[in-house]
Image (cartoon, coloured by chain):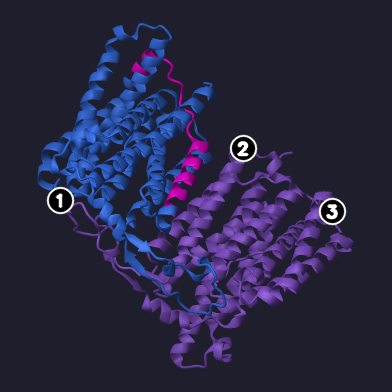
Chain colours: A purple, B blue
Amino acid sequence: MEVNRLDFYIGLSLAVGSSAFIGSSFILKKKGLLRLASKGSMRAGQGGHAYLKEWLWWAGLISMGTGEAANFAAYAFAPATLVTPLGALSVLVSAVLSSYFLNERLNVHGKIGCLLCILGSTVMVIHAPQEEEVASLSAMAEKLRDSGFIVFAVCVVGSSLVLIFAVAPRFGQKNVLVYILICSVIGSLSVSCVKGLGIGIKELFAGTAVLKEPLFWSLVICLVICISVQINYLNKALDIFNTSIVTPIYYVFFTTSVMACSAILFKEWLRMNADGIVGTISGFLTIILGIFLLHAFKDITFSCDSLPLYLRKGSHGLQWGQQPYVALPNHDTQAQDELKLPREGNSKGGWGTHQIAP
Amino acid sequence: MEVNRLDFYIGLSLAVGSSAFIGSSFILKKKGLLRLASKGSMRAGQGGHAYLKEWLWWAGLISMGTGEAANFAAYAFAPATLVTPLGALSVLVSAVLSSYFLNERLNVHGKIGCLLCILGSTVMVIHAPQEEEVASLSAMAEKLRDSGFIVFAVCVVGSSLVLIFAVAPRFGQKNVLVYILICSVIGSLSVSCVKGLGIGIKELFAGTAVLKEPLFWSLVICLVICISVQINYLNKALDIFNTSIVTPIYYVFFTTSVMACSAILFKEWLRMNADGIVGTISGFLTIILGIFLLHAFKDITFSCDSLPLYLRKGSHGLQWGQQPYVALPNHDTQAQDELKLPREGNSKGGWGTHQIAP
C-alpha cells in the first residue's frame, strides 16, 4: 500500500508547528502574569482576574489554541507514533524561550536535555512508521471493529475504572503515578478519536456527507468524555504534585500508551523493518532521557566551578586529580517558580492530544 | 555495487567484541594494581615493577591485546565510519564493570551517559554507510591515488607539522587541544593504513602474493610512523592533563577526523540517502553527549536528596516548590583515582586504531 509522502510532510510540519505554538504560549502567559504582578494586581493564584485585561495573556491563550488545532490536524495527516512523541519539542521551545525572555537560566543539564530531545525527535522522524493509509471513515470503522482493538479498548476502560474507583481514592494523593496513569490510558482513546475525526473532516472538505454517519458523532461524544476525564485527573495531579514531576512522567506514559494503541489499531509495526523499529525505540528513549535531564536537575545551578576545567575559559596546566565544583540552589528560578500560572493554565494537558505541561 | 552483508556483521561483531575486551582490560589491570597495593608492594607510579608478577595485570594486558587485534580486524570487514564511533562502547564497558568490580559508584549522570552511548551507537549501526567494497590492495591503491585523498593527506601532514613544530612547543603545556589535535589528525591516516593492511591480509589468506607488493610495505611503514607519533603525543597529553579531560575530547576529535578521512577516501556518503546521513550524525552527536555526561560530572556525587522526589522511594504528597538537594564530592572515587595506572598503561590509545583511554 503506497504511502502519501506529501501527507506525511504536512503532518510533520503541523506537529512541529503545534509544538512551537504551545511552547511559546506558556512564555506569553507567564510574561503577561509577571507584568501584572509588577503592576501590583492581585495574583491569579489568589483569585484575581486582572489577567483577563492583559493582552499578553490573551496572546498566550490564542497561541495555545492555534497549537492544539495544529496538533489535531497533524493526526489527520501523519501517524500518531510520529505526532505524539514530537510533543517533546514544546518543552524544548518553552525552555529555550524562557531563558531568553524570562531570564530563567538553563543549566548544562537543561541544554544537554534540549539537544537530546532534538536528536531523539530527528531519529524518530527518520524512522516514523509509515502508517497504513486510512483514507475514509468507513476504513476507520473497519479498524475499530478489529477484535485486537476491541480487547485493547475494553482493557483501557476497565483498568481506568479500577484506577478511578478503587485505587485513586486510597492512593491518588500519595502516589504521583495514579492520576497520570488514568490520563495516559484514556489519552490513547482520545488520540484514536482525534485521528478518526481528522479523517472525517478531511472527507467533509472533499464533499462526503460524513455528518450523517453515526460513527462521526460517536467519535465526537467519545472524545468529549475522554478529554473531560483527562482534564479532571490531570488537574488533580498538577494540584498535588510539582509540574516538573508530572511533566516527564506524563510524557512517557502518555506517549507509550498512544504508541501501543496506534500499533494495535493500525498494525503499523508489522510493515516496518527491524531497523525502523529499533530506530524508533532508540529515538523515543533518547527523548525520554532528554526530558529527564531537562527536569530532574532543574533546581540545581551548576556554577562554572562545577564543570571540568577544560570547559572553563583560560584553564591550563591542570594536574591529575579531581575538579573542584560548586553546586548552588538556583534562587532566581525559585523566586520565579513561586509566581505560578493560574490554575486554568494547567488545563492545557487536558485537550487530550497534546500532553505537555510547561 | 552490492555490499556484502555478512562482512558487515562480522565487522560489527569484531568492533563490539573489541570494545568489550578493551573495556575489561582497564578493570583487570586496575584490580591487579589494587591487589598489589593492598599487599604493600611498591606502587607502579613510584617505579615499582611488582605488577609484572601479578596474573591479573597480565590478564589485563592480554585482554587489551585481543581487543586491539579485534579492532584491527574489524576495519577489514566494516566501514571505518562504523568501527571508529563504536569505540565509545569500551568507555561504557569499563564504567559498568568498575561499578561492579571496583565499587566505583556510577552517578546518575554516568548511567544516563551509558544509556546514551548505547542508543547513539544503535542508531549509528542502523545507518552505517555501506562502504564501497574495496576488495583488493590494487583497488585500495586506486583510491589512495585519488586527488581528493592526496589533498587531504597533504593537509593532514602539513597541519601536523605546524602543530608539532610551531604550536606544541609554545602552547602544548597550556592548552589541552594541541596534543590531542596532533593525535587525532594523524589517527585518520593510521586508520586508512589499517584498513588497507586488513584488506591485504584478507587477500593473503586467500592466496594472493601481497607480500611482494610495495604498497603493502609502504602501508606498514606509514602505520608504524603514524602510531609512534600518536603514542608520543597521547602520552604527553595524558601526562599533563586529567584522563577524564583527555578521553572525551580525544574521542570526539579522533572519530570526527576518521569519519572525514573515510568520507574522502571511500566517498561512502555519496551513496547514502538523506535519512542515513541525518541518522548517522544524530547517533554520533548522541554518543558525544553520552561521553560528556559520563565524564563531566564524574567527581560529583549526586546523593539521593539531589534527585527529584519522585525518584526516591516512599515519596508522596509533595507540594509545589523546589526539591532539596545535596551534592557532595565523591571521596571514594578520588581515593581510588590516586592509585593511577602505571604510565605504560597509557599507551593503549597509541595503538592508533582504538582511541579510548580509560
Mark nearest the camera among 3 and 2 is: 2
Residue shown at 16% from the left, 34% from the top: B161
Q: Total of numbered circles in the picture?
A: 3
Q: For the stretch drawn in magenta, what is the main secondary structure?
A: helix
Residue pictured at 52% horizontal, 21% vertical: B1
**Magenta segment: does it hold B120?**
yes
Q: What residue is at 13 percent from the left and 47 percent from the top?
A: B171
Q: Is residue B357 visible?
A: no
Q: Chain of mark 2?
A: A
Q: Name the residue carrying label 3.
A: A141
Which residue position holds label 1?
A: B174
Q: Which segment did they paint magenta?
A: B112-141
Callout 1, which amino acid?
Lys
Contact flag, marks 3 and 2 (Cβ < 8 Å) = no
Q: Between residue B37 and residue A143, name the one nearer to us.
A: B37
Q: Is residue A4 left or right of residue B249?
A: right
Image quarter of the N terminus of chain A: top right
**Which image quadrant for residue A267?**
top right
Look at the picture and state if B49 lies above or below B266.
below
Q: Position of residue A93 (x, y in %)?
A: 49, 64
Question: Which residue type does callout 3 highlight?
Answer: Ala
Number of the label disc, if any, that sits on residue A274:
2
Whether callout 3 and callout 2 share a subunit is answered yes
